[in-house]
Image (cartoon, rainbow, N blue to C red):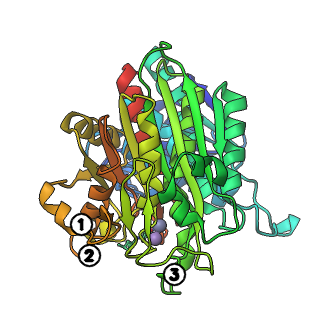
Amino acid sequence: MSLEFTLSHAAPAVVETPLLAVILPQDPAMDSWLQPLDTSLHGALARTLARRDFRGGRDETLLLVGGDTGIQRLLLVGRGAGPMTRTAIRRASAVAARQAVRLGTGALAVCAPDITAEAAEGVCTGAAAGAWSYPDLQTPPAEKDRRQPLSRVSAVLPDHETMRAAFAAGVAVAHGQALAKRLGMMPGNVCTPDTFADVGRDLAARHGMTCTVLGRDEMAALGMGSFLSVAQGTPEEPRLVRLDYRGGAPDAPPVVLVGKGLCFDTGGISLKPAADMEWMKYDMSGAGGVLGAMEALGRLRLPLNVTGLIGATTNMPSGTAVKPGDVVRASNGKTIEIINTDAEGRLVLADLLVYAAQMAPALVVDAATLTGAIVIGLGHHAVGVFGSDDAATSEVLAAGTRAGEPGWALPLWDEYKEQIKSDVADLRNTGGRSAGSITAAMFLREFAAGYPWVHLDIAGTAYSQADLGWIPKGPTGTPVGTFVEILRGRVGR
Ligand code: BES
Ligand code: MN
Ligand code: ZN
């Protein structure tokens, strides 16, 4: 990410900036905090509020023109009614950054009179989200038409230790989300399983982690017939990427983060319809989330052990592809009848979840764009959360809420197991039309034995097909924030 963050403890009125964004609540009053700003703008702020030209509604903005020095432009940004939360600050900061990009100011300072340490992190994650773009594959506009890209963001926060910590966390998470979003936006011919291996090695080198990469032969030796059945239709080498971060005691059980990394999902022999299929480049968002979380973790250097695990391949129809009716054997010995080759994510995750058990983990959380059914059930506002352990599920739900990536729990009752029983094998890979997200999670549960496990279905939340106003359409960064909050929660930071 080309964005550079700085922390400023200066009084907002004396900040030297081309654009100062002031985040205000609904119906803001002219108070002593705003007074010095008003003075430096020769009364324009007080007049604006008195006329009620700006009322502080969510996403509302008003631009005031300042002088040639000091605050050159003042952007009022509304955060709407409701409490001062990290989510509200993140959204308002993103709106501010998008405005800065449109104006071409190059730099942006952000402040809020009532900011709290809990919310302050949202300045960095929000500004990064609003400024985010993926220009790599587009010809840049002619020099004369170019706007200055936003390259510097200054968070203007009170001088306090908790604010410094929040700022550092915000910068770390912003970098993690930027990595996840970049990988998500990359088309399937650019982001391949080898890309994940390269990113894994780069993370390991920069943050002192260990990276292990397995290919087809190594996975075959481990008996990963479930994962490999998905990869058998593509000439591209599938990759299992493992990243080990050791910040805790040598014998402390790790938290394992697992990600579905389908660089593209055509559906395979059970081919998807052509309309909207291009969005299936995002079918690696779970894996991108794991790498993004590892990037944030490497910057935060939390005192615990964490392993990231990614299963990367491409689901293709071909002469060698797996077909409906085929039976394959996973690394725990269970046999699977493949009813629909488009239910491939669970086949990849099955072997990863078995592999995770050898680490005797304290917790395993997987993230996957697993089912279209979760979009029908929860839409685009909630992550589907499934868990075998109530304490772990509550922990992950709370982390998601703190991160502004809220989840909603769905049941894993034994009654649903009937739907994934097979006549010919131990399991079938689909459970029919009803409760599609639950039967997918039930399938995963068969492989997540011996540790507390939570599954996140992010098919509705990892990317957006519409511009959301505060962030452009495309990848959202979910589930990086949730992963990082789980880890921070475990060490009380
Ligand atoms: N990657 C898809 C799920 C998906 C759908 C993600 C829409 C994002 C948006 C997954 O591999 C899939 O194809 N699932 C099937 C399962 C079905 C065949 C049981 C689905 O949801 O239709
Ligand atoms: Mn699929
Ligand atoms: Zn898929």
User: What numbered label is drawn on residue 412?
Assistant: none
Q: Position of residue 423 (x, y in %)?
A: 26, 72
* Residue nearer the viewer, 490 or 309: 309
Rendered position, 115 above or below 458: above
* Residue nearer the viewer, 399 or 191: 191
Looking at the picture, which amino acid does disc 3 mark? Answer: Ile
In terms of sequence position, does the residue under pointer 2 or pointer 1 come before the other?
1
Asked if labels 3 and 2 touch by Cβ distance under 8 angstroms, the answer is no
Residue at the farthest front position: 424
* Residue at the disc numbered 2: 432
Image quarter in which the C terminus is found? top left
Q: Is residue 157 visible?
A: no
Does dot 3 land on a helix, a strand or a loop? loop
Q: Where is residue 441 in the image (x, y as percent from the top left)?
A: 30, 57
Q: How crowded is mark 3: few (under 14 residues within 10 Å), some or many (20 or more)?
A: some
User: What numbered label is drawn on residue 269?
Assistant: 3
Q: How crowded is mark 1: few (under 14 residues within 10 Å), some or many (20 or more)?
A: some
* Residue ID at (31%, 35%): 450
Residue at the farthest left position: 415
